[in-house]
Image (cartoon, grey):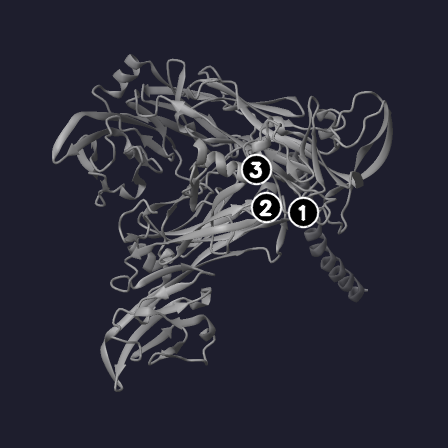
Amino acid sequence: SSSSSQTEISAGSSVTLSCQLYSYSSAGVSCGDWIRSQGIDLLWVNQAGDKLKMSDSRYQISAPGHCIITLTTTLLNEDDNREWRCEVTQGDQVKTSVTYTVKISGTSGVDDDHVFISSGENVRLPCNNALHDCKSTTWIYNSNSTAVELINLGIKKNNTDSHERLSLGSGCSLNIKNVTREDYGLYTCRQYVNDTQQRTDARVYLHVLHVSSSSSQTEISAGSSVSLSCQLHSFSFAVVSCDDWIHPEGIDLLWVNQAGDKLKISDSRYQTSAPGDCIITLTTTLLNEDDNREWRCEVTQGDQVKTSVTYTVKISAQDKTTTAVIPVHITNSQDHETTNTHTTKAQVYSTTAVIPVHNTGSISTCGVDDHVFISSGENVHLPCNNALHGCKSTTWNYNNNSAAAELITLGIKNKGTESHERLSLGSDCSLNIKNITKEDYGSYTCRQYVNGQRQGPDARVYLHVLHASSSSSQTEISAGSSVTLSCQLYAFPVVSCEDWVHSEAIDLLWVNQAGVKLKIDSRYQTSAPGDCIITLTTTLLNKDDSREWRCNVTQGDQVKTSVTYTVKISGISGVDDAHVFISSGENVRLPCNNALHDCKSTTWIYNRHPATVELIALGIKMKYTESHERLSLGSDCSLNIKNITKEDYGYYNCQQYVNGQRQGPDASVYLHVLHVSSSSSQTEISAGSSVTLSCQLYSFGGVSCDDSGRSQGIDLFWVNQAGDKLKISDSRYQISAPGHCIITLTTTLLNEDDNREWRCNVTQGDQVKTSATYTVKISDMIPDPGETEVSRTAGSLFKEILIMLKTAAFAAPTVILLQIICARRA
């Protein structure tokens, strides 16, 4: 059944489908208890019959009970008449299945002559002028370079390249299977009766979304960089380019993460660029955990998702490590690895020691190293490199420094382990673990038994888990507070973690939002108490709210895995902070503290003397304001402003209206913007020049900024690279404060100041509210004095040689002339 009672649902709407198994619960046994005992499962499958994954950004799947499963998705045009299938399975057997067909409104061939589809999908192009039957229908295709008749009076033409993929549907629509990017263009439906054209043409513009990779390989090694290009192939009618067309239509291309959120350029893992409005690229360094991940690109029009396309990357098994198995005789009554229960223990027994052997050949290792790196919270796949033809012979044992357990016995999961609900056995006998925790690190051994006899050598996998934690136990931390984040690699080697990472050239490091290693500067202090742990200490700013702090594990130049930690800043959630400080160029969120159940009642008003402007009216953005392109309304009715400028400072008022009546008190937010500028208009300044940097806080309040500064304990000051306040007594710097809202720094630039960030802080009491930086680029570096002296000496010597040459050049003819005169006289 569907959450919508409508027979047709518009594309871009969210719908929830519920699939329920109605069963007779005999003798008070609930349906849930019954299906568990029978091994019965409910699942949604895609059009290929594969189980839909929760990790797919298009689908959210939940199971409110064992006899019901729901599927929530945002509908696309291509979902029109699609069958959504739910299956009941018992073991590997499908017992029955049921489908639900959704009809998309606006795609019935009435008013939608622009159809968006992704390559590889099937599409239906409506014929809006169809007569009572299709014997009068002709379909003509036109691209920028060619025009072709596809259907003639209801009969398919067999001489076209695409004829095998075409068919005529009900309503005389044109159906195209397995759309390619070459199919984009203008499709015209025309009617003829007795060779006379009837009615006007019905036109459909087909726009095809396609993703390609910079790599021609089917498998790419982890640690490699890959660029994915997402392009919308559109018909440029009347010489109007794709770029010019999508602008007025409000069409946008974007990459989204697995949660369906737009990927940000500020994320250290991803670099996105838009060479044009009809193409967007995503560049990233692949990790092992990206194996079989779907990278999704969407086309949106306003708030509507028109279509989306995915690209799946397969991580190759290159430069793997295999294992050599060496018998080791042990005389001990303690066995540190759990073995199969059929084997009798003795005081003296044999086990195996695993020696890593580097292999660059073609030996198969099921596509995964025997050293697997993963971050906590992820899912992992541990390969079984000695699997036989089936998994009924497979046993998985787990061992770390403090615990040992048998997880899988002869293909059957043991339910006595703490992690059994997160475990599953893959079709290749691999061990799959969901939602990894730091306690899951250790040695995993895949062992084969046939008729109670152990077969072949063991296959071992060492799982190393990267985990980040905070020194604060609070869910929200106030801006201005100091926090320490710890990033630890939980590893199980034969020797200590420290010795092991040294020999394997493993490194842990914190990286900034651009993916570059964080340096110890005025904002960050990093330390490494050990080779398996690294800490980052910083003072939080408002702009750090919801920022992801990323820690990487590298081996040589390869990123093995990474983990992030997100800090929530308290006091900016729209509850008790009516003053927001931000630096120019940043993005800001202004809370609406009086929001009702939805945002259709919300109006945002901006005030700064002498202007008052309505930015949002009843949930709708006003487009006549200068800043409207940078504004958006958050799900909690907050006002989001991108790329703040100094002109954005002022008083923002959130008001609520219902049926034209104002509700409750207003929620006011004062936005204070910190901005740094230079006395020089040049992009590069020569060393030895004097420069003055001005740091100003643009504020709006009931009192002047100066009075506010004194009464509220607000202060502006310049800090050095260690984060210490610059003193007026320093001979390099001259600092002055014409007022409490402006502070200047004058200095003579040195070569070493090239690309240096000069930082200005705003504090309130002991709290840093925000900070702004200014980077100076040095032109014409001053050479070293020693080099100057050498150059000067060389120059003088050159001049002297030149004079001697000139003299010699003049003297030689003179001497010859004198000799001739003397000879004649003689």
Mark 2: which amino acid? Answer: Asp
Q: Position of residue 633 (x, y in %)?
A: 29, 37
**Marks 2 and 3, how far apart at CA:** 11 Å
| Amino acid type indicated by mark 1 | Gly
Please tell me the numbered disc located at residue 291.
2
The disc, 3 or 1, on the residue closer to the chain's N-terminal end is: 1
**Residue at disc 2, secondary structure:** loop
Instruction: Name the spot of residue 436 as percent of width and height, x first.
Output: 58, 32
Give the Cα separation between the discs numbered 1 and 2: 9 Å
Tell me the crowding category of disc 3: few under 14, some 14 to 19, or many 20 or more residues within 10 angstroms, Cα based: some
Answer left or right for 290 relative to 32. Answer: right
Foreground of the two, 416 or 437: 416
At which x and y percent is residue 476? 42, 21
Disc 1: which residue: 367
Checking the image for residue 647, the label placed there is: none
Is residue 330 among the parts visible in the rendering?
yes
SS for callout 1: loop
Q: Are marks 2 and 3 in contact (CB under 8 Å)?
A: no
Q: Find disc 3 in the rendering and name its residue.
A: 379
Nearer to us: label 2 or label 3: 3
Which residue is at the front of the view, 816 or 244?
244
Tell me the residue at 25%/64% (across/down): 110
Q: Amino acid at mark 3?
A: Asn
Q: Nearer the viewer, residue 12 or 668?
A: 12
Task: Judge left or right: residue 87 versus residue 240.
Answer: right
Relative side of 526 to 574, left or right:
right
**Residue 655 % position (x, y):** 19, 30
- Answer yes or no: do the residues labelled 1 and 2 have beta carbons within 8 Å? yes
